[in-house]
Amino acid sequence: MKKFVPGIILIGLLIATYFMYNKQLGAIPILLLSFYLFYIVYTRIKVNKTTK
């Protein structure tokens, strides 16, 4: 289940980007997507540092 949640979030943000981009609001979901991807990378780096 843990592996499906990031995929669902990414798909949801991509769908939101598609619909909001047509209304000239595409920057909002792209900004949220960048924060989410930054969080994923930060947690993976944090886990890698603690395992060493």
Image (cartoon, grey):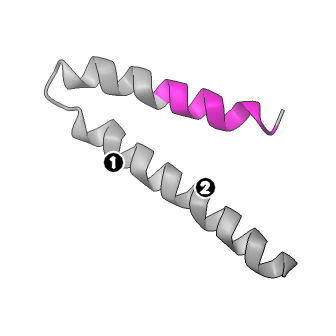
The x, y position of residue 35, in whole percent, is 44, 55
The x, y position of residue 17, in whole percent, is 33, 27
Q: Is residue 44 magenta?
A: no
From this viewpoint, which residue is outermost toward the left? 24
**Can you tell which mark lies on residue 40?**
2
The answer to whether 11 is drawn above or below residue 49 in the figure is above
Magenta residues (range): 2-12
The answer to whether 14 is drawn above or below residue 40 in the figure is above
Question: Which type of secondary structure does the marked residue at label 1 adopt?
Answer: helix
Q: Is residue 4 magenta?
A: yes
The part of the image, by quadrant, that contains residue 24 is top left
From this viewpoint, which residue is outermost toward the front? 52
Name the residue type under label 1. Answer: Leu
Screen quadrant of the C terminus = bottom right
Name the residue type under label 2. Answer: Ile
Q: Which residue is mark 1?
A: 31
The answer to whether 51 is drawn above or below residue 43 in the figure is below
**Can you tell which mark lies on residue 47?**
none
The x, y position of residue 3, in whole percent, is 77, 36
Residue at x-position 65% and y-position 38%:
6
CA distance for labels 2 and 1: 14 Å
Tell me: 22 left or right of 5.
left
Tell me: 10 left or right of 23.
right
Identify the main secondary structure in magenta.
Answer: helix
How dense is the environment of label 2, judged by Cα within 10 Å: few (below 14), some, or many (20 and up)? Answer: few
